[in-house]
Image: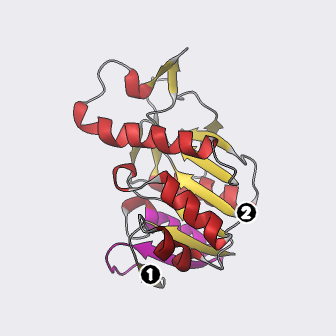
Amino acid sequence: MKVALLGASGKVGRRLVAELTGRGHEVTGIARQRAETGVPMVVTDANDRAALAVAIRGSDALMVAGRFVSMDAAVILGAVADAAVPRLLVVGGAGSLFVAPGLQLADAPGMPAEFLPEVRGGKRFLEALQASDADWTFLSPAAQFGPGERTGVYRLGGDDLMRDAEGNSRISYEDLAKALVDELELPRHRRRRFSIAY
């Protein structure tokens, strides 16, 4: 497939580039600044609807792996519609996952204040997707999300934060990249959020 990847130069974006190209997909990276990612790059502002539509036109899917504080879901959804890109897959956040009935992680006691802008941005982005007509998927990682191994061994869930037997909630960038590309190739969560954890 032809995949446009917004945020290709970031930590998760680079893992997605590796996973996509390793499976033979044609990737065009999109970022605000030129960076060496191993794939063709388009430098543009993700908040410029017309420019973003030009950058993604002709793609089979747009993957988004950027920071929510610097993106506007309405602009991205508009560009996807303008460019007639059939699918939108988003690396989400854990903040909108439920830790108890009616209580999302973002609202749970102990959430560090410095994380709140990004966490709330992720919640707003998911709500915008849910209100749209797009063919979208939003993959929420575990609470602890960082570099690691591509094990291929993890659990997929829904709207609740998953923890292991020791109470930890974690996933690697590499395994999330695998799961999102699996979803691209064999869609199972269309117009839905799903989650991942060990």
Instruction: Name the one closer to the observer, 28 or 147.
Output: 28
The magenta segment is 13-38
What colour scheme does the image use? secondary structure
- Residue at the image position 57 percent from the left and 75 percent from the top: 56
Q: Is residue 190 left or right of residue 174?
A: right
Distance of mark 2 from mark 1, alpha carbons? 24 Å
Q: Is residue 89 left or right of residue 11?
A: right
**Percent coordinates x, y for residue 162 in the rendering:** 54, 29
* Label 1 secondary element: strand
Q: Quadrant of the C terminus?
A: top right
Residue 27 magenta: yes
What amino acid type is highlighted by mark number 1? Answer: Val
The residue that label 2 is drawn on is 185
Looking at this rendering, what residue extends furthest in the bottom direction? 40
Q: Earlier in the sequence, mark 2 or mark 1?
A: 1
**Percent coordinates x, y for residue 144 in the rendering:** 39, 39
The residue that label 1 is drawn on is 42
Work out whether residue 175 can be spotted: no
